[in-house]
Amino acid sequence: MTADNIRQKLEEAFKPELIEIIDHSAAHAGHAGNKGGGHFHVTLVSTQFEGKSLVQRHQLVYQALGDMMKDEIHALGINALTPSENS
């Protein structure tokens, strides 16, 4: 369910040309420091990343996910690309 929630929030925020979400949670269950949130990797291709630095792109993704970053997501890998960077 969390991956679906991530997808919905990112689609609403970025209207991406491509969105891919990989759930790595099962591989990390029970490791030190994991208090229950999932491990995910997202790839987004959106024109909204044009002219933005890598840090700014990541900040936009974190903002879009909001409170999910507190409880539902323990770790998040991000590939935030513009359409020209994805070709």
Image: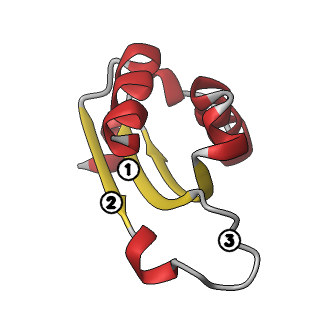
Which residue is depicted at the point 35% across and 44% down? 3
Q: Are marks 1 and 2 in contact (CB under 8 Å)?
A: no
Q: Which residue is mark 2?
A: 22
Q: Is 14 in front, or is 73? A: 73
Which residue is depicted at the point 65% across and 36% down? 62
Which residue is depicted at the point 51% across and 27% down? 50
**Image quadrant for the N terminus?**
top left
Q: Earlier in the sequence, mark 3 or mark 1?
A: 3
48 up-or-down from 6: above or below? above
51 up-or-down from 40: above or below? above
| Local SS, label 3 | loop
Q: Nearer the viewer, mark 1 or mark 2?
A: 2
Q: Which residue is mark 3?
A: 34
Q: Which residue is mark 1?
A: 43
Q: Around disc 3, counting alpha carbons within 10 Å, would you say few (fewer than 14), some (14 to 19), or many (20 or more)? A: some
Q: Is 13 in front, or is 36? A: 36
Q: Earlier in the sequence, mark 1 or mark 2?
A: 2
Q: What amino acid is found at the position of numbered circle 3 in the picture? A: Asn
Point out residue 51 in the picture as x, y percentages from the top left corner.
60, 28
